[in-house]
Image (tube, grey):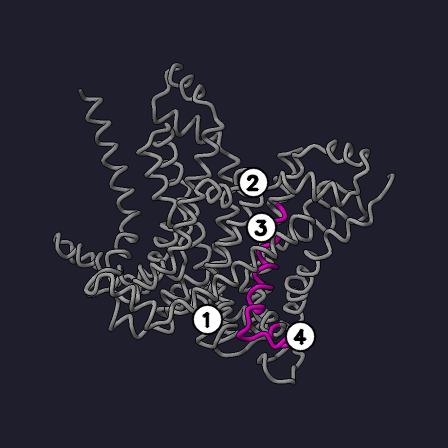
């Protein structure tokens, strides 16, 4: 290979420095700490091998957080994709009203999660929240649940809030992929005798495979990352019914100060994140080559 | 006629769904004006001293955006237009960092901040935010530069430009669209961040806009409209930028999903 440009290292040095100090080193440090019994403050750290992992894998709350994560991720990703696709498809024709609608639906995507959680705490309040008051006033008082206090419902409430925040995103992704897919496809399938429903489900939906795929990966990662909304709405409660790997880890690290144990949980989260990334790299490489 | 009514029915459903999406936003704004009206906003700015928190968030976000642009654009140029050993390995490493949630590295980052004695200082947020947000900026910027022809550089080299000059004079001016997108993405990530802001900024005068509502949780019971006025103010910079740069917001947030 002729003329290697060693000066390139000068261009990438700053970003690599940030990467090493604030990402790579913390990652390795987390792996190491997960083998110690340590509260994060004292000088003394005790090496205990894989005991943190053994203890964690025996903790039913850890498994509950994993189960919640799976339910949450599947529901949020599924609903956001279907709802986002329907909205994008119905509003595929350029028109001022639709543009306004799409702008409104996209706004929750950019809102501050802290603000969103306060607004929903207020909306979903059991006694005087707007939702329960509306339900009672139209005679559906039996549906006026304790949205965040009932352990059978709280997780689904958070799914709802997250879908509210994320549907604008999936809709926008589908809007871009639908514009690149020509209108002729839809017309041709109609001429061939397909009904509107068949055109949408059997012709258009399968053609958007790249978008479905990206949204699944991004959705899985955001489900893994979700923290602020849950921390502020329920703190993982009631009785761990909304506990996620992130809140579980946070409570161990900064609630009970078992930072060795918390690092074991963090390691599991990192392994999940890496696995998703590697799957993504594999598939995108296969599809591009 | 039947077709017409089907059409109307569909519009009605669509309108209802959009309406449902708007309810929380309408409630936010309505509650913020309840009882005292505009006075709620004056209270939020004076009694809660929100201006100080807005200033903190503006400084942190501004510095993070600048720093991210400063380190990603040259790196994107090198990864896209230069040849050097380990290029692919290094890029892959940064790709892997793309997905790491902040919470997963919170414990060591707290140690680092303690080591540098950065608690209650802007650096405690600016540097970790830069590290967490720069990898995505790099991927976007490299993707953009890959589409710029390499011949431009070769031509400029023939004309006697150094590699650095070709980067600054020829490529940099062309990267404005992607720089805008990276800016929007970084701005949102930094302004909306909560976990590190809560862990590192304990002093009242150093808190970010995302953590002050916790400080005023008492107000949640006694002065809800005042708190909601504060929430609207926190949201205003984002909404104003959204209205001004809508195109970049949508592209900036969906770019990773649409292209890859």
User: Magenta includes A74?
Assistant: no
Q: Is residue B21 above or below residue A259?
A: above
Numbered badge on residue B57: none
Q: Chain of mark 3?
A: A
Q: Position of residue B230 (x, y in %)?
A: 33, 64
* First-in-chain label (1 vs 2): 2
Q: Can you identify the residue that label 4 sits on?
A: A49
User: Magenta includes B114?
Assistant: yes
Q: Residue furthest top?
A: A191
* First-in-chain label (4 vs 3): 4
Numbered badge on residue B207: 1
Q: Chain of mark 2?
A: B
Q: Is residue A54 left or right of residue A237?
A: right
Q: Can you identify the residue that label 3 sits on?
A: A276
The CA distance from mark 1 to mark 2 is: 32 Å
Please state, as top left, top right, bottom left or bottom right, where the N terminus of chain A lies in the image: top right
Q: Are marks 1 and 2 on the same chain?
A: yes
Q: Nearer the viewer, residue A189 or B67?
A: B67
Q: Can you identify the residue that label 2 sits on?
A: B177
**Can residue A53 be seen?**
no
Q: Position of residue B12 (x, y in %)?
A: 22, 35
Magenta highlight range = B113-139
Which mark is nearer the camera, 4 or 2? 2
Q: Is residue A139 left or right of residue A273?
A: left
């Amino acid at each position: 290979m002729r003329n290697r440009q060693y000066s390139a290292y000068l261009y990438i040095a700053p970003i690599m420095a940030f990467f090493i100090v604030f990402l790579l080193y913390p990652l390795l440090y987390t792996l190491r700490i997960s083998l110690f019994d340590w509260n994060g403050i004292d000088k003394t750290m005790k090496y205990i091998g894989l005991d943190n992992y053994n203890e964690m894998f025996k903790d039913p709350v850890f498994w509950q957080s994993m189960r919640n994560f799976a339910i949450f991720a599947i529901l949020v990703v599924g609903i956001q994709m279907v709802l986002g696709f329907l909205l994008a498809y119905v509003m595929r024709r350029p028109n001022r009203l639709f543009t306004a609608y799409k702008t409104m639906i996209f706004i929750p995507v950019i809102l501050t999660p802290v603000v969103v959680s306060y607004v929903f705490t207020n909306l979903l309040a059991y006694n005087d929240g707007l939702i329960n008051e509306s339900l009672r006033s139209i005679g559906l008082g039996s549906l006026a649940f304790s949205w965040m206090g009932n352990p059978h419902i709280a997780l689904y409430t958070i799914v709802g809030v997250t879908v509210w925040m994320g549907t604008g995103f999936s809709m926008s992704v589908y809007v871009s992929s639908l514009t690149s897919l020509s209108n002729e496809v839809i017309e041709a399938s109609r001429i061939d005798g397909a009904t509107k429903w068949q055109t949408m489900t059997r012709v258009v939906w399968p053609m958007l495979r790249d978008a479905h795929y990206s949204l699944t990966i991004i959705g899985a990662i955001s489900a893994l990352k979700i923290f602020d909304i849950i921390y502020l709405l329920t703190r993982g409660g009631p009785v761990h019914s909304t506990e996620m790997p992130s809140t579980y880890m946070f409570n161990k690290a900064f609630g009970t100060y078992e930072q060795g144990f918390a690092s074991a949980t963090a390691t599991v989260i990192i392994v999940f994140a890496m696995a998703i990334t590697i799957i993504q790299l594999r598939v995108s490489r296969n599809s591009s080559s | 006629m039947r077709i017409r009514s089907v059409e109307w029915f569909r519009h009605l459903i669509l309108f209802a769904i959009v309406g449902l999406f708007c309810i929380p936003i309408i409630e936010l704004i309505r509650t913020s004006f309840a009882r005292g009206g505009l006075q709620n906003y004056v209270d939020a700015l004076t009694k809660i001293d929100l201006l100080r928190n807005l200033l903190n968030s503006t400084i942190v976000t501004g510095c993070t955006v600048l720093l991210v642009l400063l380190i990603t654009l040259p790196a994107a140029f090198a990864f896209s237009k230069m040849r050097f050993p380990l290029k692919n390995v290094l890029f892959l490493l940064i790709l892997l960092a793309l997905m790491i949630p902040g919470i997963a590295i919170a414990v060591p980052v707290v140690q680092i901040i303690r080591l540098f004695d950065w608690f209650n200082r802007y650096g405690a947020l600016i540097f970790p935010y830069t590290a967490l947000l720069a990898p995505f900026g790099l991927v976007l910027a490299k993707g953009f530069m890959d589409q710029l022809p390499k011949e431009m550089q070769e031509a400029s080299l023939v004309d006697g430009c150094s590699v650095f000059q070709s980067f600054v004079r020829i490529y940099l001016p062309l990267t404005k669209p992607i720089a805008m997108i990276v800016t929007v993405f970084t701005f949102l990530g930094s302004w909306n961040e909560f976990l590190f802001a809560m862990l590192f900024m304990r002093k009242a005068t150093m808190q970010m806009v995302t953590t002050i509502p916790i400080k005023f949780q008492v107000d949640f019971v006694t002065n809800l409209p005042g708190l909601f006025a504060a929430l609207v103010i926190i949201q205003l910079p984002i909404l104003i930028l959204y209205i001004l740069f809508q195109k970049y917001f949508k592209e900036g947030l969906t770019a990773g999903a649409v292209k890859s």
